[in-house]
Amino acid sequence: GIKMFAKLVAPARGRYFSVKNVLNKKSLSSTINVQQLNPPNPLPSSAIPEPSKGLPVIVKAYYMAREIDIMKISGSLYSNAHQEFQKKSVILTINESFNQYVTVFKYGSVVLFNIPTENHVEYLRQIKDATIFPIADELRFSDEYKVIVHDNLDKPSVIKAEHLNIRNLDKKNITIVGTVMAQAIALDYYAIEVDRQLEIFMKMNLNIQSTGDFRALSDQKLFKMVASNNIVITNVLSKLGLFEGSDAAWDNADYHYTWEALRKDFELDSTFRDLDLKLGIIKDDTRFFLEVLHNKKSTKLEWIIIILIGAEIFIGIYGIVN
């Protein structure tokens, strides 16, 4: 059963999804005035401009570490760049004329806007100096997406199968695109991490099924897995802020529409639900094996007590006899 669940989530590489009914998205947060923020009706396909007629912006996201010190980045690494701090990130303006920006997130994601591919290694090398618990380069996750800017777009944004059309790449749109990609790439990393844990538990279960022997259980290995599972839960639930919304999209219907549609395109909610399901399976397995270890230790202590009592009785009888 675990192996079946281990296939539920496969990290989406390439991020070129087939999107259906994204443009009909009308459900907004209950705390927002729905009548004011309902998105306009979808444009007919003939009204959506061709990608070749817009200005392309290539966006590349990396997951580098479990945490990044954004104050260190702003203070020393990119002190000359224009900086805009947000709750969980900082936007660095590299070259506004060429739509070149770098967005660094506290929870370990880095999103590069229109930075030439040959320069990525240097940017990541500099940012790595500010990482906490960095991920090995060979395990680093990356994802790419295309944004096309159309000045004459009638609608604030239109998501197609392989790209996002927007009217302008302002700071709010940079925040929206960067945040969604940063969360998506982090979820991809944790999905693989959880799959790895499920695989370990599956092997442990299969071994016990075939041998019926619990003696091979390692306390240290199990405790490490418990800690790893706790880290995933903490990072996904508290640090990523998947359900916190976006300040950039909060008070404007156009940006809110782009935020919701892009989240749906990257399937953040469904990915989290699948990840949460797997974490539940790991939690149940962990509880089971911890109880087994506890019972083993209790049995061992009981035998030690019995032996000590027996030894005391033996010594007492020996003293009386002599």
Image (cartoon, rainbow, N blue to C red):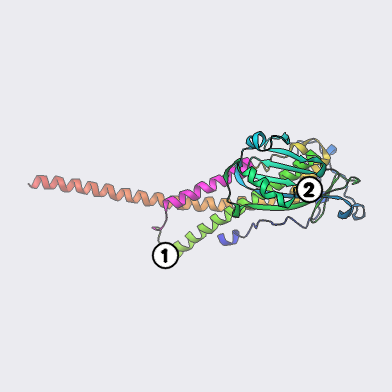
Q: Position of residue 48 (x, y in %)?
A: 89, 52
- Residue plotted at (67% across, 47% down): 122
- Classify 86 as above or below 124: above
Task: Specify the label residue 185 is tagged with.
Answer: none
- Classify 65 as above or below 82: below
Q: Position of residue 312 (x, y in %)?
A: 19, 45
The residue where tag 2 is placed is 261
Indicate yes or no whether the magenta region holds residue 278: no
The first of marks 1 and 2 along the sequence is 1
Secondary structure under the numbered disc 2 in the rendered image? helix
- Nearer to the camera, 151 or 9: 151
From which residue to which does the magenta span run? 215-239
Q: In the visual, does 22 lie left or right of 1?
A: right
Q: In the visual, does 189 lie left or right of 178?
A: left
Secondary structure under the numbered disc 1 in the rendered image? helix
Mark 1–mark 2 Cα distance, whole angstroms, equals: 51 Å
Amino acid type, mark 2: Ala
What's the magenta bit mostly, secondary-structure-wise?
Answer: helix
